[in-house]
Amino acid sequence: SQKIEQNSEALNIQEGKTATLTCNYTNYSPAYLQWYRQDPGRGPVFLLLIRENEKEKRKERLKVTFDTTLKQSLFHITASQPADSATYLCALTSGGYQKVTFGTGTKLQVIP
Amino acid sequence: GAVVSQHPSWVICKSGTSVKIECRSLDFQATTMFWYRQFPKQSLMLMATSNEGSKATYEQGVEKDKFLINHASLTLSTLTVTSAHPEDSSFYICSAGDRVDTGELFFGEGSRLTVL
């Protein structure tokens, strides 16, 4: 069965450092990989999407890589700030509103 | 980005009663909406796919008679939890998208249901 693992349940880093979150998947050939941010008691907010034929995507302080050979995505937040503290979810989809499957999430805490 | 609104944001009800949660796409039309359920410290589990003008598609293990979904218009889908019990207490979140190619989703604010 399809499985998405986000290796760290929780990650603590110092303000100003780069946070790196990992998403690994098995038994899946996604067309798109997405990253969402979720704050406590709120719905997820879309951050970035990367296609299977893209290696890297950037948006402001965010960078996502996608390695379909390793079946892995890395999500980087550079110059991290306390306001970046949240749970980050990766999600896979075949596109076209096919089922979007979410990982378990990594709770990031940026320490001032 | 597109805006999805969900109401109510929290509700407390007695066991045996039914609760309706609304999900609206405010600035786009959504032929497809998704309902998720999330338990504390767990990820989102897809419950069903709501299709405008037709029956919802439920995920394996989700009771369709328990969780009634109606998608009567292109901007509104409702989830009714019938004869709610304490084990139905959870965070319910709807989502929709306006990008058919990539399937990126915009989520509602979520509805916290507590069944006493």
Image (cartoon, helix red, strand yellow):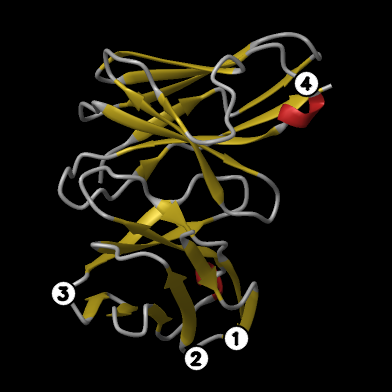
Element on which disc 1 rests: strand
Residues packed near mark 4 inside 10 Å, few (<14), some (14 to 19) or many (20 plus): some
What is the CA distance from the residue labelled 2 to the residue labelled 3? 29 Å
What is the CA distance from the residue labelled 4 to the residue labelled 3? 46 Å
What is the CA distance from the residue labelled 3 to the residue labelled 1? 31 Å
Residues packed near mark 3 inside 10 Å, few (<14), some (14 to 19) or many (20 plus): few
Residue B20, position as x, y percentages in the image: 56, 14
From the image, state whether disc 1 or disc 4 is nearer to you: 4
Give the residue type at disc 2: Lys
Q: Chain of mark 4?
A: B
Q: Chain of mark 1?
A: A
Are circles 2 and 1 on residues that touch, CB within 8 Å?
yes
Give the residue type at disc 1: Ile
**Up/down of A25 relative to B29, above or below:** below
Front-most of residues B25 and B39 = B39
The residue pinned by badge 1 equals: A13
Q: Earlier in the sequence, mark 3 or mark 1?
A: 1
B25 lies left or right of B63 = left
Element on which disc 2 rests: loop
Give the residue type at disc 4: His
From the image, state whether disc 4 or disc 2 is nearer to you: 4
The residue pinned by badge 3 equals: A53
Front-most of residues B94 and B48 = B48
Residue A65, position as x, y percentages in the image: 30, 81
The residue pinned by badge 2 equals: A17
